[in-house]
Image (cartoon, rainbow, N blue to C red):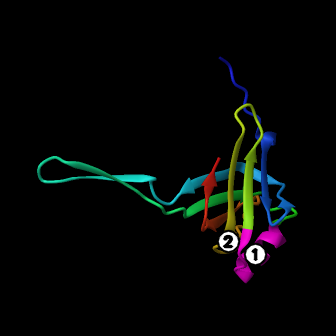
Amino acid sequence: MSYTYDPKSVSVIIQNVHLTGFGESMVEIEKDEDNYETSVGAQGDVVRTKINNNLGTITLTLQPTSPQIPFMNNLANTGDLVPVTVIYAGEQKEITSATQCYISKPGARKYANALEDREYEIKCLDLVFE
């Protein structure tokens, strides 16, 4: 079975704003903790515990010329809680969303012989993988 991935099938929406101008690494999504944890007693009994922590982190990389840089910096400075949705509309559709997110800080500014991408870390309080 062959599969073709197209980066243009990825959309990121923050507070009804569609982001554009992604850097090469675009977006990374990760839960902060595992879904389950196991422990073993002295006699070898195993207990599996469900972890109900839905915290997660979405890391976005934008080119320094992205028109959404001021929007992202403003959200980082205000600390407002906003909804975030990441959609992959390719052959194996995936949606990741959270209704309460904040941007931890503005993207680092680097000026050298070439402009570098800006990275934004979005903390999600109720991350859902669909």
Tag 2 near tag 1, CB within 8 Å? yes
**Where's residue 7, x and y in %?**
76, 40
Segment tinted magenta in the rendering:
69-82
Quadrant in the picture for the N terminus: top right
| Residue receiving disc 2 | 103
x 66%, y 75%: residue:
105
- Callout 1: few (<14), some (14-19), or many (20+) C-alpha neighbours within 10 Å? some
**Where's residue 63, x and y in %?**
78, 57
Left or right placement of residue 5 versus residue 29 in this view = right
Residue 67 visible here: yes
Left or right placement of residue 24 versus residue 124 in this view = right
Q: In this view of the protein, which residue sits in the foreground, 65 or 120?
A: 120
Farthest residue, direction left = 43
Q: In this view of the protein, which residue sits in the foreground, 129 or 23?
A: 129
Q: For the image shown, how many numbered marks are present on the structure?
A: 2
Left or right placement of residue 46 versus residue 74 in this view = left
The secondary structure type at the circle numbered 1 is: helix
Residue 26 visible here: no
Q: In this view of the protein, which residue sits in the foreground, 121 or 62?
A: 121
**Where's residue 115, x and y in %?**
76, 60
Question: Which amino acid lies under the numbered mark 1 shown in the image of this protein?
Answer: Leu
Q: CA distance from mark 2 to mark 1?
A: 6 Å
The secondary structure type at the circle numbered 2 is: strand
| Residue receiving disc 1 | 75
Question: Which amino acid lies under the numbered mark 2 shown in the image of this protein?
Answer: Ile
Farthest residue, direction top = 1
Residue 107 in magenta?
Answer: no
